[in-house]
Image (cartoon, grey):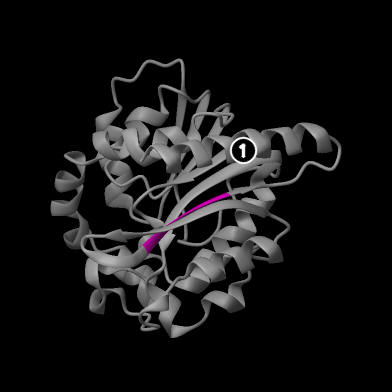
Amino acid sequence: MNPTGEKDLAGTAARRNLETCAKPELWQDWFDEAECSIEDQWKDPIWPLIRRMDFSTVLEVGPGAGRNSERLKELAGTLHLVDFNEYALELCKRRFQDHAGPCVIRYHQNDGCSLPFIDDESVTFVYSWDSMVHFERTVVGSYMQEFARVLKPGGWGFVHHSNYGTISENSDIEQAPHLRSNMTSDLFRTFCEENGLLRTSFLVFAWGGVEGADCISIFQKPDPDRKFAAWRARMLHRLSWRFWLLTR
């Protein structure tokens, strides 16, 4: 049985979204353009918000051509790159073909919603930047179920997703600016709550001139056996978050 709830992905909207996300022609030019912006994005906001994470085993959803993976492999012990698009994974494999370690990079093509190749409670950090912004809301909901399963207790997630659903509920991303989906910040919080995850911080922001189009959500899988350590980690993260906001 599909752990992400096959019935949730049976709808036309989700199927169309996955088919759209699998079109290489939509991403080829963007992969090149995005390389020019990732250095600045990594400096602000990404690195200040993830620098306290445990990078022992990292799961990146939607690596594209590997611009984020390039940086994550310098931090991770094991890096799982997961994409529905075979074209993207081939680009990553070519990019890192001479990588000699110490990080172990594993490549996984999935069905666009589940992670059957990742063991339960084996991941310390889930990461996605400028990818899940394109995922229709039920697809995001399915991934959240999987994140709750694969994260170790005390593990964290950093996900850049769409908030464009507050502007339009149209599920066709090709009709939205920057191919943004009908996902929202509030719905992401609901998905966290439904799956026993705690969203500790979020930020709604503009993308490409569209005010309120995107959101960063940071969440944790609580560790019932290490409550004080989990609380301390959340406090440190919140301090980092507030410092970053004050210094922007």
Residue corresponding to mark 1: 123
Front position in the image: 248 or 93: 248
Q: Is residue 107 visible?
A: no
**Residue placed at 60% from the left, 64% from the top?**
189
Q: Secondary structure at mark 1?
A: strand
Give the vertical position of 43 relative to 201 (above or below).
above
Residue 64 image offset from top left, x and y in percent: 30, 47
Query: Where is the N terminus found, in terms of image quarters?
Result: bottom right
**Which span is picked out in magenta?**
214-218
Q: Is residue 207 left or right of residue 72?
A: left
Q: Residue at x 18, y 53 (%)?
A: 30
Q: Characterize the magenta stretch by its predominant secondary structure.
A: strand
Disc 1 residue type (three-letter): Val
Q: Is residue 82 left or right of residue 16?
A: right
Q: Where does residue 133 sit, x and y in percent of width and height?
A: 37, 61
Q: As rendered, which of 172 and 165 lies closer to the eye? A: 165
Residue at 36 percent across and 41 percent down: it is 248
